[in-house]
Image: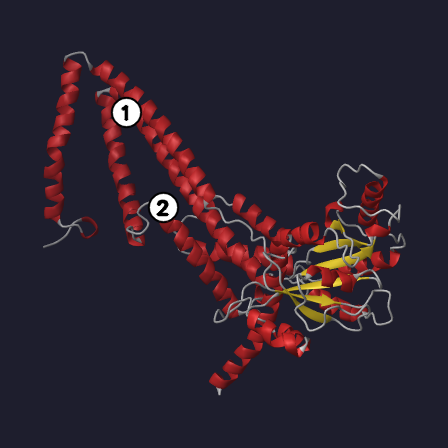
Amino acid sequence: MKTLFYGIDPFRLLGFVLFVLPFLALLGLGMVWLWQHGYLLFWALAMLICTGLGYGVQQLLVRRDRRLLAEAVTEPNPEWPLSADEAWDRVQALAQNCKAEDWPLEKGDWILALGRRTLETVAHCYHPQVDKPLYELTVPHTLLVIERASRDLRRDVTENVPFSNRLTIGDLFRVQRWKDRAEQVFDVYRAGRMIVNPIDALLGEAWRHLRERSYIQARDELHRWFLRTYIRKVGYYAIDLYSGRLVLTDDEPVTARTERTTADMHQMDQAADTAAEARIEEEPLRILVLGRSNAGKSSLINALFDKLATVADVLPDSTEMLKPFALIHAGLTQALIFDSPGCDSENFDSKKLHDAAKDADLILWVSPANRPDRQIERDCLDALRTFFSKQTTRRPPPLLIVASQVDRLRPAGEWNPPYDLTHPQNTKAVNIRAAIEAIAIDLAVPTDHVIPVCLMENHVYNVEDTLWAAILNHQEEAQQARLLRCLDEKKKTENWKLLRRQMINAG
């Protein structure tokens, strides 16, 4: 048997008409009855009141849905390097300026075009001198960005869009086609209704306008959210890629122990080597102790240990090379701490220092509080800051200044801790506070990043409480630096592994 419009069985259409015909007749007869008994105006007034209340409820629902959708907004990753801030601002601007009418969902090419524009927005931040920066991406990395963004978008749509797991794309197109035809038929009905009963037609038009306005507002809100979420997802993983956080292989954890750390652990004393390797399974935090000669760097490392993880009980006063020690403390993740030569000694090598600082996750700079000549320290720190500013795929490690030898400040013969440095009550406390502020100014660091300590034998002060508290407070920031460092290491290893597999498979 032949079918009617768009493959609909005529018997199914007849059954549907017979099903709704009694309800249509009841509606018409009810209107006649209301008109005959003079209740039509009361009914129209009740309809307007209910419509207004329904519109108000609909607005509340729109605000609630807008709030729920706002909670699902993609946020920037705090583990990104500083160079990602500008790129994320541009992605946010692109998402905010995206108009729903410019990207109709019924056209299938929007997803590629909008994704390409987002990728180009991010690529311009990292390759501003290239005419077509998008071409700087490799094919596998491009596919990986699309894969990750699609995965997250699928999860957000499933969780936030009603019936998204039941309606097919074909259903949406069929609804759109029937909607256009139904609107044509309904326009004819509206014209006839205006001729037969103008008052009822005007009331009906007002109700229809409010209903459609609520529907269109909710639909446009969902459309805009979908487009903005897609832009943010693609931009998020594009920044992940350009900032060095997106790797092609997921077979090993990102924070697996690096070759550099394994080599450093072999430098430790043989007695401590086995025990340390047994404890350190993943990449530890790398804490670098820097400062001038005789500032107390080795004494500080001794003071940080509850007990030394090496054979030697005391570290040497002068250090000729970077020497690692396994550092253990309650609340601290696995860590290696490195002693170093003084920045004013003949053993000091600025290039070697920069290499060590690049692999450091936390830097402790030891500065004697009783020495006002800090220009050489400032020059060394400024050189480090310049070096870190050129590392676009990394975050600089947190820097803490350890103000040593505070016991030698005037009056030199007085040492009766603890001292209240927030509200100093005596000359010693006032001078310690003044030394902290002077060091902060001279070395261009925040005052709360300067921790005064005493490292005298049997008179260690402010290490176990204040200094360790500062280290643990900056542990999360140090772990973010470690993650980016491990990602760089993994990408280098990944390139060689992939090249080897590609050559074998090609052969």
Determine the image quadrant of residue 15: top left
In the rendered image, the residue lying farthest to the bottom is 507
Name which of mark 2 and mark 1 comes first in the sequence.
Answer: 2
The answer to whether 273 is drawn above or below residue 428 in the figure is below
The answer to whether 23 is drawn above or below residue 43 in the figure is below
Q: Which residue is mark 1?
A: 204
Q: Which residue is mark 2?
A: 161
Residue drawn at 90 percent across, 54 percent down: 373
Q: Quadrant of the N terminus?
A: bottom left
Residue 441 position, x and y percent, is 82, 47
Could you tell me if residue 163 is visible in this image? yes
Q: Amino acid at mark 2?
A: Val
Determine the image quadrant of residue 478: bottom right
Residue 234 position, x and y percent, is 50, 56
Q: Residues within 10 Å of mark 1 (few under 14, many from 20)?
A: some
Mark in front: 2 vs 1: 2
Determine the image quadrant of residue 488: bottom right
Q: In the image, is 374 to the left or to the right of 358?
A: right
Could you tell me if residue 101 is visible in this image? no
Residue 39 position, x and y percent, is 19, 13
Kindly state the secondary structure of the residue where label 2 is placed.
loop
Residue 391 position, x and y percent, is 69, 62
